[in-house]
Amino acid sequence: MNFLADRKASQTMDRISSENFLIPPLVLMEKASESIRDEILKLPAIRDVLVFAGCGNNGGDAVCCGRMLADEGKNVRIVSVTGGHRESPALKSQLETAKRLGLEIMDFNEFSGNLTDIPPFFKADLIIDGLFGTGLSRPMEGDFLRAVKIINSSAAVKIAVDIPSGISCDTGQVLGCAVRADITVTFGLGKVGLKVYPGIDYAGRITTVKNVFPGKAIETAVRGMSPRIFTFTEDDIKNLFPERRGRKHKGSFGHALVIAGSSKYSGAAFLSASGAYRIGAGLVKVFTHEANRELIADKLPEALLDTYVDKQSALSSLNDNISWADAILIGPGLSQDETAKSLVKEVLKCTDKPVVIDADALNIIAEESLCSLLKANQIMTPHLMEYKRLSGHDMEIIRSHTLEEMMNYTMPPVLVLKDAVTLVRQDDNIYINTTGNSALSKGGSGDVLAGMMLGLLSQGMENFPAASLAVYLHGACADKYVETRESYTMLASEIPEMLKSI
């Protein structure tokens, strides 16, 4: 797993390195600056470099890097932006070194003009943003705000030190105004604010340099995180995926029950069942309205099938189907009629099997005020609007503070909050997904995802890893698709097929 640092964890890595392992801040600064320099030297046609240095150690990193670039023959100028605050000792030392080496340094206080009359001093091929690092917790103001606006107005390549100035390390929120970086070089651990919106839009290409801090300092920071926020590596995926050993049969890999579809909506049941089968479920049964019999039999002959025609016949068959299943999915295309409501209420009583709750089932829970019936053996998979109905929270707050919504989530089920960056939470763990693209913005893709979760659950995976792995693989299918085709051409029914290529 790649753990992500918030502001507190970032400060812990820095402090532990100096206090416990006696590595001076200037040594840490040299290592960080070398990594930024190395990224810059990979870029073509960089001659004039402008360094914006704030009053803290982030500014010291930027000045130190500027001095190293001057040694590489670059024309480096430094803008010191203190906003009336005291400079850190390490920054003072770096500025004095730069001064003695003959680098040109300007105090931003000397610039009193407006943003339409920026002097030639600010022209550059590349700008290093060292105004603020991960410690910023208040909105930009004064000289800092003006400096950010000057940086953003430039056509120069912009490289941010640790995190673009103005982005909250904890939430990815823009604190008044933020630098729009082309590249961000971050240290020790990836940062939470670089992996969620809107911060991800400001970060550009992200390089994480781990060897700036001792490994034990990073381990200490990770142990102190609450909640623990992480992304997956490819090795995680290999280790998480259910193992398939020899001398097994179809019943060894789980019985997956899909309760989906209605007389109005037929495709969802097929898509969900396809996702469950393609991810490895041994047997998949579709329990759906009789109107869908022909479609399921034709499109997915591998599936078992049971149907109903009305509320009475649905309820009379439900318990036998639940007894057969190892894991259950309810909701895709189910509609919100009385039959669907009765099915949802009965399934919510299930206490001994994992249940994926999706689509219409979520809307029924919200409409019927059934949240008190939710249990820890369940997974809820709402998109933002469905989450609004469940939580009663304001849509704009949910959209703009999605990670904070996830951090404040208190209902028992595992929550999969679907968005451009999908988040998964259980207790003190939050998974941030890093796969996927706009190819998934098609009707039915969520049905496939729910089916994939069901398929993993039926094979014995626990709820949280099953939900997180399914989200990762679902996005990876879309990433694989766009390697050779345009994103707008993918259909939801092609996602299960793409699993063969992952």
Image (cartoon, rainbow, N blue to C red):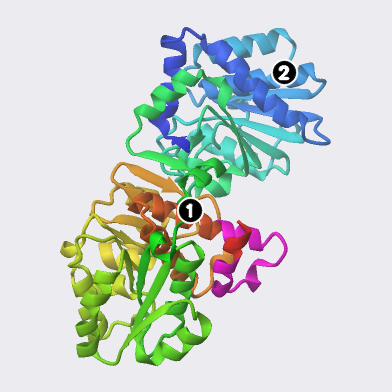
Identify which amino acid the numbered label 2 is placed on: Met
Residue 182 image offset from top left, x and y in percent: 66, 42
Helix, strand or loop under label 2: helix
Magenta-drawn segment: 476-497
At 49% from the left and 20% from the top, the residue drawn is 215
Identify which amino acid the numbered label 1 is placed on: Arg
- Image vertical order of residue 72 relative to residue 172, above or below: above
Picture quarter containing residue 320? bottom left
Instruction: Indicate left or right for 172 with 187 as reference.
Output: left
- Image vertical order of residue 14 relative to residue 3, above or below: above
At 48% from the left and 38% from the top, the residue drawn is 1
Residue occupied by mark 2: 68
Residue 339 image offset from top left, x and y in percent: 24, 85
The crowding category of the residue bearing disc 2, from other C-alpha atoms within 10 Å (few below 14, some 14 to 19, many at least 20), is many
Given residues 82 and 345, the one toward you in this image is 345
Helix, strand or loop under label 1: loop
Instruction: Indicate left or right for 303 with 394 as reference.
Output: right
Q: Earlier in the sequence, mark 1 or mark 2?
A: 2
Q: Is residue 40 magenta?
A: no
Instruction: Indicate left or right for 188 with 346 as reference.
Output: right
Main SS of residues in magenta:
helix
